[in-house]
């Protein structure tokens, strides 16, 4: 009898590829741990896209965070130039060199010399590389950029042979290497070979749309490992390179049943009496001047009153302008800023592209660690990309915020003439709660109305409320509904006064009719009493006659008996 083998015995033990963490924010998440350890990685791209900086940061992070010394081989820039270029990032290359954590060697290769001799090999480079590696005990190495090695050399066979030899040599040294290369016309690199002999290939790109520049990173190849395959925006700023990993974000985040106040008590009442769900997304839409920013500011104040931090991202107003405007409705936000609970970032949307906005927002979120976030308004971000890009931006942002349990409130400006219950970017379906604030004109005035279009997961009000901004704060009134129309403002007040007068007249008429009825009742009762007295009198007279008749009959009988005795009748 044939025995079936255990299925687990058929599987070979899983061996994970050893990886070298780069320490670059987001890149290790995309590569699921870093670059292939002890193997070469090609970083290619056009001039100015950040190849040299990525290589330098790989070495600096390795030396300072992972205790791995590195070697940087430059074929274009000097040590002084490299040191000055990264000084603004806070990286002191001179100190790292002094500490034997970093070795920088600069090669100058004259193409004319290669053409004159007609012979070329990298033996001299291997000797210098090996010496540099041994001096600091390097675990990491960067070659920047490889095209310079073969500039002016027309013999393709020699170039390909030496390239293969270089990559094999690096592997034998056991160092994790980054080789940077310029992008070719039809290939990732000018020689068209490096991407085939590299274990990992990363492409950097820089694009300009509507005069806004965006850098992108893509892992094209990674032997023996899974990796994110999308294009990821990355930012170069004072902290170095930040890549925004998005592939890991999905619809599997946890949700909360906790409720938090909107900052407006009657709005909380409309929201099943308890306010928004924590970690949900809220959209406030309306035309200009309808009070969207005020609703957002009250939400921010409510978060600060609970002792929680709030990140307020303003695309139209400066922080001081927001503080001044909110004071007009009796809302003072300045104490929350002084306590470090409210963090306002104000900037024009055209400062960054959409992708860089996303990267920057992630940085602020990591720095501030807020529980709530406000974006006021999101409609301005359309200026920095297409509608499709803007929608994609908000899908990724909302998913990330939900995964972090951060409640976000966004305002959206609706242009005049656009239909209500509509957003130009079509993001309303992504929102858990949707408030609409509108203005109605009539009777020579303009009044605001507020309604809940939707609020997922709770029993919410379907009423339209008049929304007033007063010097004492936000006031949500009951809207007068009568004569098949909604009345607000002075029209509502006039109609309520007319209704009060009508009710008073009706009450007076009822009182008058009641008095008339009481008088009639009294007259009838008097008549009934008179008739009863008359009846009693007639009854008494009849009783008297009956008594007289009875007495007469008795006397008559007595007289007849007396007469009979006198006549001695029988």
Image (cartoon, rainbow, N blue to C red):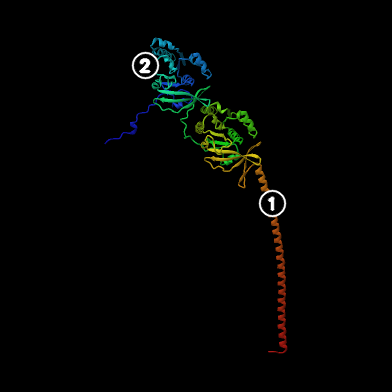
Residue 127 vs 363, above or below: the answer is above
Would residue 161 appear left or right of 289 to someone viewing this image? left
Residue 505 is labelled as: 1
State the image quarter where residue 326 is shown. Answer: top right
Give the percent coordinates (x, y) of residue 318: 61, 28
Residue 331 vs 69, above or below: the answer is below
Give the percent coordinates (x, y) of residue 304: 59, 32
Of 313 and 569, nearer the camera is 313
Residue 271 vs 202, above or below: the answer is below
Residue 89 vs 301, above or below: the answer is above
Which residue in the protein does label 2 denote? 157
Q: Is residue 540 visible?
A: yes
Helix, strand or loop at mark 1: helix
Query: Residue at the location (71% across, 87% down)?
Result: 564
Query: Residue at the location (47% across, 33% down)?
Result: 250
Of 471 and 561, nearer the camera is 471
Would residue 102 appear left or right of 521 to someone viewing this image? left
Helix, strand or loop at mark 2: helix
Label 2: how many Cα within 10 Å (few below 14, some 14–19, many 20+)? few
Would residue 33 appear left or right of 561 to someone viewing this image? left
Give the percent coordinates (x, y) of residue 490: 66, 42
């Amino acid at each position: 009898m044939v025995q079936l083998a255990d299925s687990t015995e058929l599987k070979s033990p899983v061996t994970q590829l050893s990886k070298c963490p780069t320490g670059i924010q987001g890149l290790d998440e995309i590569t699921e741990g870093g670059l292939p350890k002890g193997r070469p990685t090609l970083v290619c791209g056009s001039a100015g896209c950040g190849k040299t900086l990525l290589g330098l940061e790989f070495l600096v992070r390795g030396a300072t965070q992972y205790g791995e010394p590195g070697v940087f081989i430059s074929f274009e820039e000097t040590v002084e130039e490299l040191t000055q270029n990264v000084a603004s990032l806070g990286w002191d290359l001179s100190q790292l060199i002094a500490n034997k954590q970093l070795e920088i060697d600069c090669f100058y290769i004259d193409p004319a010399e290669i053409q004159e001799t007609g012979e070329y090999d990298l033996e001299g480079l291997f000797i210098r590389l090996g010496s540099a590696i041994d001096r600091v005990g390097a675990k990491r190495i960067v070659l920047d950029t490889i095209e310079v090695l073969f500039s002016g050399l027309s013999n393709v066979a020699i170039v390909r042979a030496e390239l293969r030899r270089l990559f094999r040599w690096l592997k034998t040294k056991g160092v994790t290497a980054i080789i940077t290369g310029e992008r070719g016309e039809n290939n990732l690199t000018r020689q068209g070979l490096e991407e085939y002999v590299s274990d990992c290939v990363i492409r950097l790109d820089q694009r300009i749309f509507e005069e806004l520049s965006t850098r992108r990173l893509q892992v094209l190849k990674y032997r023996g490992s899974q990796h994110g395959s999308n294009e990821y925006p990355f930012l170069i700023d004072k902290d170095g390179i930040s890549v925004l990993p998005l592939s890991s974000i999905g619809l599997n985040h946890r949700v909360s049943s906790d409720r938090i106040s909107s900052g407006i008590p009657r709005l909380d009442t409309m929201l099943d009496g308890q306010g928004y769900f924590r970690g949900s997304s809220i959209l406030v839409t309306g035309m200009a001047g309808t009070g969207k920013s005020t609703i957002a500011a009250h939400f921010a104040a409510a978060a600060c009153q609970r002792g929680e931090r709030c990140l307020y991202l303003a695309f139209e107003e400066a922080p001081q302008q927001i503080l001044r405007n909110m004071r007009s409705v009796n809302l003072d936000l300045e104490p929350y800023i002084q306590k470090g609970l409210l963090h306002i970032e104000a900037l024009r949307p055209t400062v960054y592209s959409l992708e860089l906005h996303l990267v920057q927002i992630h940085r602020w979120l990591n720095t501030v660690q807020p529980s709530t976030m406000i974006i006021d308004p999101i409609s301005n971000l359309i200026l920095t990309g297409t509608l499709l890009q803007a929608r994609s931006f908000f899908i990724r942002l909302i998913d990330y915020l939900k995964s972090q349990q951060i409640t976000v409130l966004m305002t959206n400006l609706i242009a005049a003439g656009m239909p209500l219950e509509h957003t130009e970017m079509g993001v309303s379906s992504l929102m858990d709660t949707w408030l609409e604030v509108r203005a109605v004109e009539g009777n020579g005035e303009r009044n605001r109305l507020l309604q809940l279009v939707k609020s997922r997961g709770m029993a919410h009000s379907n009423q339209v409320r008049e929304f007033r901004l007063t010097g004492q704060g936000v006031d949500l009134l009951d809207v007068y509904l009568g004569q098949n129309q909604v009345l607000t403002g002075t029209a509502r007040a006039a109609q309520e006064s007319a209704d009060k007068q009508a009710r008073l007249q009706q009450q007076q008429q009822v009182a008058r009719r009641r008095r008339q009825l009481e008088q009639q009742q009294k007259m009838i009762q008097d008549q009934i009493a008179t008739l009863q007295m008359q009846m009693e009198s007639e009854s008494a007279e009849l009783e008297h006659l009956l008594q007289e008749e009875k007495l007469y009959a008795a006397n008559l009988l007595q007289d007849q008996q007396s007469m009979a005795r006198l006549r001695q009748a029988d």
